[in-house]
Image (spheres, helix red, strand yellow):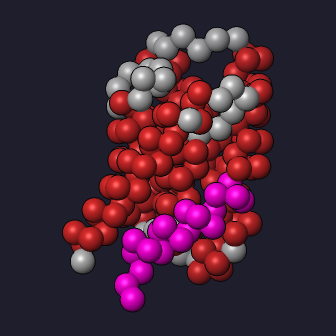
Amino acid sequence: MITRQLSFSALIFLFIYTIQESFVNQVRLPGGGFSIFLIFALVWSALSTPEVGAVTGFSAGFLIDLSPSSSGPVGQWTLILILTCFGIAFLGFGDDKSRGNPITIVFLVVAGVFLAEVSFLITGVLLGVNLGSFTQILIILFGMSIWTLLITPFTLPIFSRLHAFTFDTG
């Protein structure tokens, strides 16, 4: 049972990561665009237990750290996403009303993306990463949040079905 879940999860993660790297990263959108892989990882965490959320954060962070378009030291995204995905899973796990309500999941994902980006900025300053101007940072934070808010309702049904296919037995 666990082998089936891990195998399907790994294949789905690699597929979404490939879409992110080969297509989404190539599209230039105003305000910084969006990360379909980050949205996927947070939706997957919101639908899972906190333990699965932490593993999801580790896997997603590790893949983002390996991305050629990722700036910052290796391990920075892994640490941030372990904490963010665990937090999202913890908030979504305790209340069945939040799991059944797509608006709550969209809100959790948008808040998670915003907090992950702010955490990346804060840890980047601590690690000496060159970030850019203050206005550019604000535009990117606002733009990514708006794009995530626009994209998540369309991707949520797909990601929910993939999660159900992987973890629900039937």
Q: How many numbered discs, if any? A: 0
* Residue 146 percent coordinates (x, y): 77, 42
* Residue 16 percent coordinates (x, y): 47, 48
Q: Residue furthest bottom?
A: 170
Seen at 69% across and 25% down, the residue is 28
In the picture, measured across the screen, residue 10 lies left or right of residue 136, that is: left
| Magenta segment | 152-170
* Residue 67 percent coordinates (x, y): 41, 29
Report if residue 161 lies within the magenta region: yes
Vertically, is 28 above or below 156? above
Q: Quadrant of the C terminus?
A: bottom left
Q: Quadrant of the N terminus?
A: bottom left
The part of the image, by quadrant, that contains residue 17 is: top left
For this rendering, which residue is in front, 148 or 159? Answer: 159
Vertically, is 117 above or below 107? above
In the picture, measured across the screen, residue 168 lies left or right of residue 27, that is: left
Q: Is residue 119 visible?
A: no
The part of the image, by quadrant, that contains residue 95 is: bottom right
Chief secondary structure of the magenta span? helix
Seen at 47% across and 68% down, the residue is 163
Seen at 41% across and 56% down, the residue is 12
Q: Residue furthest front?
A: 23
In the picture, measured across the screen, residue 81 lies left or right of residue 108, that is: left
Vertically, is 57 above or below 120? below
Report if residue 82 lies within the magenta region: no
* Residue 6 percent coordinates (x, y): 28, 63
Q: Is residue 11 visible?
A: yes
